[in-house]
Image: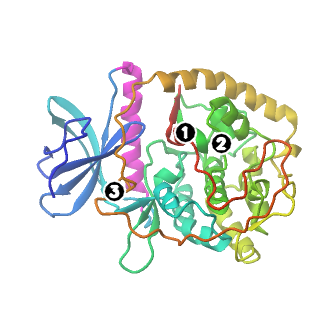
Amino acid sequence: MGSDTSEDPLGLCGATLEGRYEVLRYVSRGGSGAVYQATHRGLGSPVALKVLVLGEALLAEDQARRVETFHAEARILARLDHPAVARALDHGATGVNGQELLWIAMEWIDGLTLDAALDARGRSPLAPREALKLLRPVLEGVAAAHALGIAHRDLKPANVMLAATARGPDRARLVDFGVAKLFDAERGAGDGVTRTESERSAFSFAYASPEQLGRARTGPWTDVHALGLLLVELLVGRPAYDASDPIALAGQILDPERPTPARAGVAVGALEPVLARALALRPADRYADAGALLAALDRAVEAAPPRAARAPDVRRGLASPGGRLAGGAWVAAVALLSLVALGATWQRATSAPTPPPRAPPPRASHSLEAPPTPVVAPREAPAVPVATPPRRPAAPTVQGPPRRSAPPRSREIFIE
């Protein structure tokens, strides 16, 4: 396989790291790392090289934080051994082209991101059992991380790979622990207003939790919220938060009426109260961790309808433990913290150097082949008129719900 130097932000294509990793091609770039495909010269096996990118505009203090975060990711991946999590194979620092580069050699995963797979199948909704079956490996992987005191904090479709397997359907794998952290299991979730003690946090805006927006303490409860958002997206066929304007998006994240399937007009039976609790505004009102969420989903899915259906009343099931019962004072407190952070955050994100454009093919960050057949065949969702919620209008019930706007899904926000 030849190298691809047409788009190579660090000029690594064709180079060899540590005398054993031959860089073949540039794949993609995230918030702080560029991913390359390489091959181990001794074993002949493919690997994914994640290389730290330090922008010239960053202050020395910011660069030091990113370096420490990168080292922390390597340590976390070495500690976490689960079949649903991409494994770290090696870690080091190498001088290439006159620059010192930090890198992590990771297991190469051939497949599609969940984002690309949903696009390939037209984003038609999945039935409850199908959605849980697809996301189960991720739930199990996050539960294993929580058991080890690790919170991912950036769960989103772009960080879930559907890996090709030799024994059956593609299997979901979790990648990118770049903003993961170790948490103290003895400290509870709290009310979601207590300010974080860390100097830096990061999140993807369209999958953020209320506490991330308000710079409150994060932990396994933050991942529970993100897992709830992923399940809603699979069940409804579009992202739970879909505003393109940052202020409107923040309003959706802090809305007391949580973005459950019922609010989108989709009836999922016993899964509705489970997702309402997972998406509660107050972290303390959610499931304690991913393991508890998975157990509740398993109990509920047996009572759920075999197919997703349109809900006869979109107002039904919206009163969740963290919804209206949480009280306006809590929402106002988080909103105040959020809006203060949002102004500086959005200005920083929009003024940051624009990363190199991503390659157009829908193939995921770990693939060279043509896109495989989507994991789940498209199915039709019955189109029945839906009552309009008072807070925001329900999306039109037509075949193939509209795709979300790209910027808020891909933008990663760093707060200091």
Q: Which mark is residue 209?
A: 2
Q: Nearer the viewer, residue 218 or 21?
A: 21
Distance (Cα) linking label 2 and label 1: 9 Å
Choose the circle earlier in sequence order: 3 or 1: 1
Identity, as a three-letter code, of the amino acid under mark 2: Ser
Q: Position of residue 57 (x, y in %)?
A: 37, 20
Q: Position of residue 5 (x, y in %)?
A: 19, 42
Distance (Cα) linking label 3 and label 1: 22 Å
Q: Secondary structure at mark 1?
A: strand
> What residue appears at the point 57 percent right and 61 percent down from the top-left corner?
143
Task: Please say if the residues under marks 3 and 1 sit with CB atoms less than 8 Å apart.
Answer: no
Residue positioned most to the bottom = 167
Task: Please say if the residues under marks 2 and 1 sit with CB atoms less than 8 Å apart.
Answer: yes
> What residue appears at the point 52 percent right and 60 percent down from the top-left corner?
118
Task: Name the image quarter holding residue 110.
Answer: bottom left
Choose the circle earlier in sequence order: 3 or 2: 2
Residue 285 appears left or right of 358: right
Q: Which residues are magenta?
A: 57-81
Identity, as a three-letter code, of the amino acid under mark 1: Phe
Label 3 neighbourhood size at 10 Å, few (<14), some (14-19), many (20+)? many
Query: In the rendered image, which residue does mark 1 sit on?
Result: 203
Q: Which mark is residue 124?
A: none
Residue 334 appears left or right of 131: right
Q: Secondary structure at mark 2?
A: loop
Distance (Cα) linking label 3 and label 2: 28 Å
Choose the circle earlier in sequence order: 2 or 1: 1
Q: Which mark is residue 366?
A: 3
Q: Position of residue 322 (x, y in %)?
A: 80, 47
Task: Name the image quarter holding residue 262.
Answer: bottom right
Q: Nearer the viewer, residue 413 or 195?
A: 413
